[in-house]
Image (cartoon, helix red, strand yellow):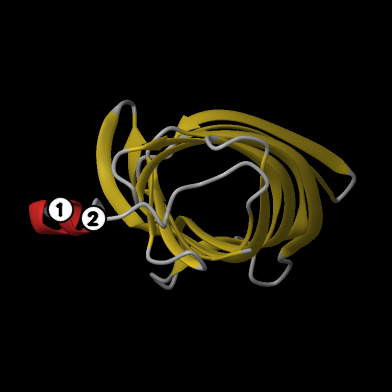
Amino acid sequence: MAALLLFAGTDAFGQIEKGDQNVGLYLIFSSKTQDVFINDNPTSQLPATLEMGAGVGYNYFVSSRFSIGATLAVTYTSTPIGKKANGNYMYTKTYGVSVAPEVRHYLPLTDRIYWMVSASAGFAYGNYKEDQNPGDPIETNYKGWQVVVQPIGLEFRASDKISVGMTVGGFARTSTSMTANGVTVKTIQSLWQLNKAELSLNIWF
């Protein structure tokens, strides 16, 4: 790591300037396990909830440290909710699309490595499926919004034209609503997403 930082600080070609722009390709991944409790006693552990996604984003730098932009992403989430009579697990599955305006702050650690803090607020829409009742599965659409703050991120400027970045964890406030069988359910959550990672490849111009 020390060798990388030494190499990264040898010249200034990776510095960010006002008016710079980039387009990024993003990969999103998170996984977490869930424990089943009865009367506050753990009875079993479900398989991991899995979230995967991909997206494209655009950023414009209003100064050498601040950018504004937006991200368009598609996501897939699989969440186990229990066991069926035959021993197989029941899952809820969602397929969604989100659009999120975003602001970022960049703190230079070397000439090529930057610490990133980002915040976004956006809208999500998608499809929800639940196989709890195999003979009569629930399938409906959902919609909602989310606010996300990601304080842990690094970006490495490999050249004037290319950089790679990574963010880990973050705080999210989400709200979703869906209607199935005449019943509308609205869910609001606040959570730290320490198990979530986002990787990016960015082209600068």
Which quarter shows the C terminus? bottom right
Mark 2 and mark 1 residues within 8 Å of each other at the beta carbon: yes
**Tag 2 residue:** 10
Residue at image point 71% right, 49% down = 70
**Visible in this render: residue 13?**
yes
| Residue 139 location, quadrant | bottom right
Side (left or right) of 190 relative to 39 = right
Q: Which residue is mark 1?
A: 6
Residue occupying image coordinates x 37% and y 65%: 158
Image location of residue 150, percent across then percent down: 47, 36
Q: Name the residue nearer the viewer: 137 or 148.
A: 148
Query: x, y (%) of residue 84?
Result: 47, 65
Query: At x 86% / y 51%, what residue is drawn?
Result: 181
Q: Give amino acid for label 2.
A: Thr
Q: Residue furthest left?
A: 2
- Helix, strand or loop at label 2? It is loop
Count neighbours of disc 1 (C-alpha within 10 A) and say few if under 14, some if 14 to 19, many if 20 or more.
few
Which amino acid, by three-letter code, is at mark 1?
Leu
Relative side of 162 to 59, left or right: left
